[in-house]
Amino acid sequence: MITYILQRLVQAVPVLIGISVLSFLMLHLVPGDPVQIFAGDKPLTPERAAELRHQYGLDRPLVVQYADYASHAIRGDLGVGLRSQRPVLDSILQALPSTAQLTLAALAMAATIGVTLGVVAAVSHGSWLDTAVMATAMLGISTPVFYSSLLLILLFSFTLTWFPATGQGGLERLVMPATALGLASSAVLARLVRSSMLEVLRQEYVVTARAKGLAPPLVVLRHALKNALIPAVTMLGLQLGALLGGAVVTETIFSRPGIGRLAVEGILGRDFPLVQGTVLFAASAYVLINLVVDVSYAVIDPRIRYR
Amino acid sequence: MSSGAVAQPRRAPVTASGAAERRTAAHATNRLLKSRSALIGGGVLLAIVLLAIAAPVISPYDPIKTNQRLSLEQPSLDHLMGTDRFGRDIFSRVLFAGQTSLPIGIVSVAIGVLFGVSVGLLAGFYGGWVDAISMRIVDLLLAFPGILLALAIIAILGGNLTNLMIAVGIAAIPDYVRITRGTVLSVKEREFILAARVIGCRGPGIMLRHILPNVVAPLIVLATLGMAAAIITGSALSFLGLGIKPPTPEWGNMLADGREFLQHAPWVAFFPGAAIMLTVLSINLLGDGLRDALDPRMRV
């Protein structure tokens, strides 16, 4: 087990280095002189350009610049935001709880709705209920998060006035963004749980459980569901990426001060240290989360380790 | 290759596999035509594409010209979907927006397929360092959650139609690399490839004539479903103000425009969003049908 964890950790290192190279290069891939970015809207005289170039170390060889960037980044120094003049890491850490809260709530929402609907559809296989659930899932998969968000606001904030439309804080401001964000994932999950449940329900041990006279709900919950959930757990891990990406849109719509909104603000304001920082942070976090997810599969299902 | 004696034994397996391919294709078409959802999806998609193409002919108003007197009119017989804040007819704009939003899906999928399949074929077929390097790059691209990669590319290139297509296309490459490479790896060990080698086929020939056809079925399915995803990502970026800028009508930026008036003029946001949803839904229905028809093993 420890060998497996170490192996996965070692495999993550080149990816993390690659991410840092990409986020470092972002600044230099922008068409034109990178100094222009630091000058902002102010006119750039040759003297000012030379001064800025020196100040930000842009006059050194690219490799030296990268080494400098990487060594600072490892120590948590992601530079200073051009607009806010605050350390980028501070802005990110301040935004982190909001994004974590939203993503986890959406994940919980997706898991609850997805598994319930999937089981209901599988148990009533071939009936109108099955068809209705699957049609709803198809609709859910096809609705972009920015549209479902607006429809939820229209219905629950403006028409029914149950929840506030925007802002952060309290459960009542979390329900709608989490639902909107989790909706598509719950639909993906419902389809998967249904098909894996249908497969499991045909297995001999389920037939045996039925034959010994166990009540149908117990057969489903105690015997079938546990095994049907293994692919669902995998899918949930994969959906995390979609949720983190979706958070960019959801946070903008619901005016939540999260990392996604920070990234969008950075791009719109051409604040490159901020964009580089959020990209580096989000991608590294995603790699590490996936690592944890992979390791936890290996704990749940020992067969995975030997693949 | 030039002499008939050498060509003869070579033609035999090709014809056999050709006939088998035709049979499979006929089966697949049959299955596809039996799938009601695929037919509905395909039909609706066709209608949406035709409406977008015919926009200059059938749209009742100019999609760009403003008229303040008609600002935020409710849907009526004059304006089927109402008007926006500048008094522009939303129905006309939704039709014209199809000319921007649909190509984003098509072109970015084409970019993803072109690069993804080439890299996947080479990586899977040659293995070794080609495979190692390409798969590390794919791992790297996959390390970016959701639309973050497209977002980063837009940050570098700036937001316009071409860059949007490139960004969404690059973000899609890993999926195509993986499915192509996976199929190549499983097909490469089969007997007909060995047979092709024995009769003197070279690497590139084997790759293109014998391996590539096996990738086509899963690729069609992935590309179809990928088009739905690309349309969503493209309009999401425009929605965030990072893609197509107004006044050019695009479903995502129209939706963003309607956000401000959601409470008092919900139709401004409702119809462009419905257009995206209907397009994506029809593509997904078609994609599901194609998957069941072409590759029943992939069925979820």
Image: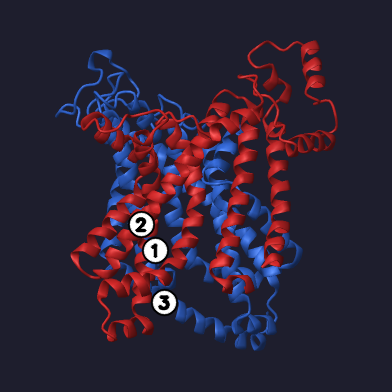
Chain colours: A red, B blue
The kind of secondary structure element at disc 1 is helix
Q: Which mark is residue A192?
A: 1
Residue A119 drawn above or below residue B189 = above
Q: Amino acid at mark 3?
A: Thr
Q: CA distance from mark 1 to mark 3?
A: 27 Å
Closer to viewer: mark 1 or mark 3: 1
Closer to viewer: mark 3 or mark 2: 2
Q: Are marks 1 and 2 in contact (CB under 8 Å)?
A: yes
Dot 2: few (<14), some (14–19), or many (≥20) neighbours within 10 Å? Answer: many
Q: What number of labels is visible?
A: 3
Q: Amino acid at mark 1?
A: Leu
Asked whether, in this view, residue A58 is left or right of residue A283, the answer is right
Res B284 seen here: no
The kind of secondary structure element at disc 2 is helix
Q: Which mark is residue A266?
A: none
Asked whether, in this view, residue A191 is left or right of residue A27, the answer is left
Q: Amino acid at mark 2?
A: Gly
Residue found farthest to the left: B77
Q: Position of residue A131 (x, y in %)?
A: 23, 63
Q: Residue at x 40, y 31 (%)?
A: A254
Residue B295 drawn above or below residue A10 = below
Of all chains, the one bearing label 3 is: B
Q: Are marks 3 and 2 in contact (CB under 8 Å)?
A: no
Q: Residue at x 39, y 33 (%)?
A: A170
Q: Position of residue B215 (x, y in %)?
A: 53, 68
Q: Residue at x 40, y 52 (%)?
A: A185
Q: Which mark is residue A114?
A: 2
Q: Position of residue B134 (x, y in %)?
A: 68, 57
Q: Which quarter of the figure is the N terminus of chain A placed in?
A: bottom right
Q: CA distance from mark 1 to mark 2?
A: 9 Å
Q: Of B130 and B13, which appears nearest the observer? A: B130
Q: Which mark is residue B24?
A: 3
